[in-house]
Amino acid sequence: MNNRKTAADQTRRHVLKGLAGSALALTALPILPVTTYGAGKKTLILFFSRSGNTRKLATMIHARVGGDLLEVQPAKDYPQDYDTLTKEAKKEQQEQARPALATKLPNLDAYSTIFLGYPNWWGTMPMFFFTLLETHDFSGKTIVPFCTHGGSRLGRSEEDIKRLCPKTTVLKGFSAFGKHVDEASTEVDAWLHGLHIPTVR
């Protein structure tokens, strides 16, 4: 009887010792970091709006993804008259102009994801956005384009961004008809969901 009890005690101590060793081994395993979209850095939403439509769209996106919101302004004033504006925009594009910026951008090192918003002028971004992309280092960033338009959607702006910023990842852009921006909420949600971009609400 005593021999059986002693054997049982030894077996129990062996099992407990083995479990304790296993627990120590599990505790010693490295804790791997969880990879998330844009982990460790912030999101920046850069946009320009002449009529207010792109500003509405930028604000709508900002309400969903958070981060910092900054309206980009050119150094010169563009005409308020639509026809005069389109002539000016076409002239700049034909001349491959690089209009100066009035807005100073923050340190881009703090951001991993940059939403880029603009109205579609003659099939692409306003030419001062070319200035913006050529004079700042977007290397390693994820750029997410969005625009408002009168019928031509994103035009060739996505291709222009990829050409100007070859060391970035350019995600599928979003476009909204200028007059219907207020009705774009559901489409914005679907777009962000399709890109697997987490939202704050």
Image (cartoon, rainbow, N blue to C red):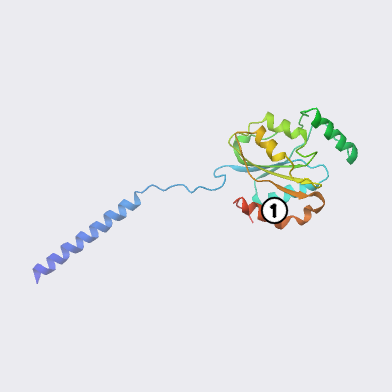
Residue 119 pos. (x, y %): 78, 42
Q: Residue at x 30, y 52 (%)?
A: 24
Residue 184 pos. (x, y %): 74, 55
Amino acid type at circle 1 is: Val
Which of the two residues, 153 or 66, is positioned nearer the viewer here? 153
> Crowding near pointer 1: few (<14 within 10 Å), some, many (20+)?
some
41 relative position to 135: left or right: left
For residue 36, say whether it is visible: yes
Give SS at disc 1: helix
Residue 143 pos. (x, y %): 64, 41
How many callouts does the rendering have?
A: 1
Q: Quadrant of residue 84?
A: top right
21 relative position to 133: left or right: left
Q: Residue furthest bottom?
A: 1
User: In the rendered image, which residue does mark 1 sit on?
Assistant: 188
Q: Residue at x 58, y 42 (%)?
A: 41
Rendered position, 38 above or below 23: above
Rendered position, 96 above or below 198: above
On the rendered image, what quadrant is the N terminus found in? bottom left
Residue 185 pos. (x, y %): 72, 56
Q: Quadrant of residue 168?
A: top right
Q: Quadrant of residue 6?
A: bottom left
On the rendered image, what quadrant is the C terminus found in? bottom right
135 relative position to 119: left or right: left
For residue 199, say whether it is visible: no
